[in-house]
């Protein structure tokens, strides 16, 4: 699965045997339990045990924070990623990698490791607002990578089928198509919702309690607590120590966030909400954006009233402008509403053969955002050579074709190609005082570089939505 954190994953962590005689202490775990008491020494072994027993708690996990696994994590990090508060780059750290990793391992072993301040930056959102992003220091990224792999191994077996974000072999497109399948079977009422400022309002207390459902390792829990409480340096130099929230954009943040939503929403819906329903109901969630479908209006109304209180219990609030209840009924198309989810617009229509179908098309809002992102990207790279620009544009279009390539969306994909072509034509002609191309020559150049209309009718499984931003 491609992740929104942007890190690459060339290998998996395997080792928990630290060097220089640390093995026995680490394998025994922070509470002094021996290997015969259920302590596992590698991620594959932990994964097998986690799948066998969904209620089992694991100890001795802190022993996996060693230089062997740190090197795997270091090699997986992006070399060109933004630096944290200490300004150390990937290249600089690599110069004395063995000594650096040994020092990091020793500080963790002796409990002298201290999480550095998180650097806060703001990036623009499609609605004109700014999204806060936290950038950890390089060493914090390395340790967080290892802990993320451990947590993912422990919790992945218990995650529900309704959850699609931040999970291996699952994507935004799969979530969109699964929602289409569920809607067209028997659903007549829909509740769509989004959590307001989710990453900024996560309760540290509840988060740690949820992690302890599978982690019986006080040392590892203490390490995660340090990251949650780490100070955040704002762009103006002020340092804040948040009592709530987790920095969005860090390597580890997606997995604990998914764990948090698993317990407060997915599990609650499966074990409590559905039992009180008079008809069928389903949930599809991608990160903090989710859609719930119901057979009967009474069930939808009951859930719609309960949801705010459920979120409030765990310190969260719903975004009012993105939370609503509405009809989505094939037998009352004129009264049914359309809605957007993960860049697709959902609408009941009648096909050319006279059948009722749910048509998925690229939402107008997402289409405008795609073109705006192209303009911003080109402004940053307008001095690059033409062949490089066109190569990147081809990759961007290929990603869009793969993601939005579903049955019934060909016209929107061709419309997207035309918008891309016209936007790029105007932008390239502005690079110099003289007009660089006419439309005939420009079309010929695009064809030579393989930048063409979408033609395939094959429905591809696509790529995760976050990949589109990584191409920039």
Image (cartoon, helix red, strand yellow):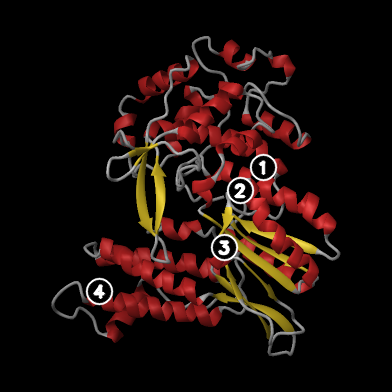
Report, in whole angstroms, how far the alpha carbon at label 3 lies from the one at label 1: 22 Å
**Rendered view: 37 above or below 196:** above
Q: Which mark is residue 167?
A: 2
Say which element carries label 1. helix
* Residue 37, position as x, y percentages in the image: 73, 17
The answer to whether 69 is drawn above or below residue 441 in the figure is above
Q: Determine if residue 12 is in view.
A: no
Which of the marked residues, 4 or 3, is nearer the chain's N terminus? 4
Image point (76%, 71%), residue name: 187
The residue singled out by tag 3 in the image is 462
Answer with mark 1 or mark 4, whichever residue precedes in sequence.
1
Q: Residue at x 29, y 85 (%)?
A: 439
**Image height check: is 424 above or below 92?**
below
From where the camera sits, is residue 466 visible? yes
Residue 156's tag is 1
User: Is mark 2 in CB contact (under 8 Å) with mark 1?
Assistant: yes
Q: Residue at x 39, y 19 (%)?
A: 103
């Amino acid at each position: 699965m491609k992740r929104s954190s942007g890190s690459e994953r060339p290998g998996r962590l395997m080792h928990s045997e630290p060097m220089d005689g640390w093995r026995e202490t680490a394998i025994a775990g922070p509470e002094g339990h021996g290997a015969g008491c259920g302590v596992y020494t590698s991620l594959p072994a932990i994964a097998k045990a986690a799948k066998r027993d969904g209620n089992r708690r694991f100890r001795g996990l802190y022993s996996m924070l060693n230089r062997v696994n740190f090197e795997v994590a270091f090699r997986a990090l992006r070399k060109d990623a933004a630096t944290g508060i200490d300004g150390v780059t990937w290249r600089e750290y690599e110069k004395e990698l063995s000594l650096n990793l040994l020092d990091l391992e020793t500080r963790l072993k002796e409990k002298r490791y201290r999480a550095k301040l998180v650097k806060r930056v703001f990036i623009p959102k499609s609605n004109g607002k700014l999204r806060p992003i936290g950038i950890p220091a390089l060493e914090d990224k390395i340790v967080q990578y290892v802990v993320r792999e451990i947590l993912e191994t422990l919790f992945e077996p218990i995650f529900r089928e309704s959850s699609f974000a931040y999970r291996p072999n699952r994507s935004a497109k799969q979530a969109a198509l699964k929602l289409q399948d569920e809607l067209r079977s028997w659903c007549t009422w829909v509740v769509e919702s989004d959590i307001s400022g989710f990453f900024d309002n996560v309760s540290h207390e509840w988060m740690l309690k949820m992690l302890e459902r599978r982690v019986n390792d006080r040392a590892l829990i203490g390490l995660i607590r340090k990251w949650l409480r780490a100070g955040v340096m704002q762009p103006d130099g002020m340092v804040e120590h948040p009592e709530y929230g987790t920095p969005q954009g860090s390597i580890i943040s997606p997995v604990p966030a998914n764990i948090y939503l698993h317990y407060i929403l997915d599990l609650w819906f499966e074990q409590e909400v559905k039992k009180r329903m008079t008809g069928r109901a389903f949930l599809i969630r991608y990160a903090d954006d989710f859609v719930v479908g119901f057979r009967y209006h009474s069930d939808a109304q009951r859930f719609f009233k309960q949801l705010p209180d459920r979120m409030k219990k765990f310190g969260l609030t719903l975004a009012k402008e993105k939370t609503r209840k509405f009809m989505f009924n094939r037998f009352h198309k004129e009264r049914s509403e359309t809605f957007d989810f993960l860049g697709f617009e959902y609408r009941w229509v009648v096909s050319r053969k006279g059948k009722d179908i749910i048509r998925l098309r690229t939402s107008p809002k997402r289409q405008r955002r795609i073109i705006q992102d192209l303009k911003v990207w080109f402004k940053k790279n307008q001095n690059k050579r033409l062949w490089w620009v066109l190569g990147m544009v081809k990759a961007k279009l290929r990603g869009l074709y793969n993601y939005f390539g579903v049955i019934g969306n060909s016209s929107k994909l061709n419309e997207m190609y035309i918008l891309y072509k016209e936007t790029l034509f105007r932008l390239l002609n502005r690079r110099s005082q003289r007009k660089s191309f006419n439309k005939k020559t420009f079309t010929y150049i695009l064809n030579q570089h393989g930048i063409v209309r979408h033609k395939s009718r094959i429905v591809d499984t696509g790529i995760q939505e976050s990949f589109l931003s990584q191409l920039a």
